[in-house]
Image (cartoon, grey):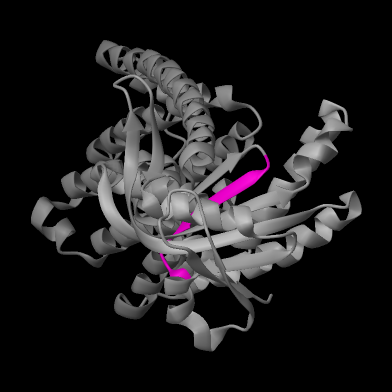
Amino acid sequence: MSSIESRLSGTKKSQIVQEFFNNSAHFPIVNIFLEMLLKGTSVYFLSAGFVLMLMSAVLQAYWLGRWQYEKNPRPLIGNLIGVFCYTVGEIALHILFLDESFSQSLNFFEKPHHLAYWFFSILIGILQYFRWYYPKLIVLESMVRISILGVMYWIFEQLFLNTSFHCHTDPVNFFADKSHIFLTLSIFFLGIVFGFAHLNAQIYLTILKETSRQLQCYSEWLLGRHLLDAAINNPESLSLNRRERTVIFVDIRGFTQWSELQNPETVVAMLNQYFEIGESCWLSNSEFNQYLIKTKYTGDEIMLVMDDSNSAIQLAQLLSKKLNTFLKDFSLGTGIGIHCGFLVEGLLGSQKVKAYDVIGDTVNTAKRICDHAISGEILVSENLWLKHSTNHICKQQQQVKVKGKREPLTLFSIAY
């Protein structure tokens, strides 16, 4: 995953942490306070039940966050992980340490806050599942979440006042107290407010992510993924610097004459396919993609700047093979020139308009070498050949006079 994709989607760790605080920890936090007040702070926090409740929430957050990161959400099953682990753990603790029988340990389900845990887990899981199809259900989900506080307060009060509490305690008595009515109405309407606020935030977040992905696409077209990732991690990497690079130029021989006889739509269709085939050559190989610094299309010409000269020659050989096979149907072919040396690269332009480009004699020489390559030929400069002569076969050596050079260049035609 690229740096910009990681920033948009989040890392696995961030997804797990977000899941814990946005969902999995909600009921356990309220339940922890309830049991703490009923059993005593020191007693509860030193008990296995506290650790079990906390670890169950963490385990649920891990799996829900992981599935979310892997683009394979399972909200219904995932929201049952915490309550299932807590239930199984509590029953096991009663059997192992309190010498209770299995039937006695099932008294776990007689406690109203335990049943509430199952109820809210199932309900939230169902709402999250359908929220993928109906996003506005997030309002109802927020109301359910905040109602955890009201339900658990009701349970706490009944347990605190009446140790023989059962789930069927008449709620009419609870609402006879005006403070309870105030609390319930406040929770209900705050749930609505929070729900719409969350919905609004989700809408804007979706728009922001879609816009960011569009900008990412446009930026990759202009800079390429390698440069874009570098710029995201370190903006200074786009500043002008002197570096040693290998430059490849690929040009279609006979293109001008051929295009004069075609309509513009045919020419554009052919060029698009030509560029697609070229792009597939470096995208198909992780090594090429790793060392590719810049790609530039100008008319029928492809310019590539690479950070490794041997990989550049191998890529040129693959390009020559694939592109000449494609262009054969149009009675055309490519000439390729390669040269390595120092150049200046970085952002060039005015304060308002800039483009990442490469400047220097290395670039000009690579272009001149390409101009001398006939259809189907790959020409490399002498300094590049001396570096890699043992790895490639030379078909022909020649000296050519090029524009801007006092002395002739010694070029080597290599096989592919």
Foreground residue, 30 or 296?
296
Q: Which residues are magenta?
A: 300-309
Residue 163 visible in image: no
Q: Position of residue 148 (x, y in %)?
A: 38, 33
Taking 129 as reference, is 205 above or below it?
A: above
Foreground residue, 262 or 96?
262
The image quarter containing residue 348 is top left
Q: Residue at the spot x=46%, y=31% of the render?
A: 212
The image quarter containing residue 58 is bottom left
Q: Position of residue 239 (x, y in %)?
A: 26, 42
Q: Residue furthest bottom?
A: 390
Q: Position of residue 342 (x, y in %)?
A: 32, 58
Q: Residue at the spot x=67%, y=54% of the render?
A: 278
Foreground residue, 142 or 181?
142
Residue 398 painted magenta:
no
Dominant SS in magenta? strand
Residue 305 painted magenta:
yes
Q: Position of residue 49 (x, y in %)?
A: 28, 62
Foreground residue, 312 or 127?
312
Taking 263 as reference, is 377 above or below it?
A: below
Q: Residue at the spot x=78%, y=46% of the render?
A: 254
Q: Residue furthest left?
A: 42
The quadrant of the rendering that contains the C terminus is bottom right
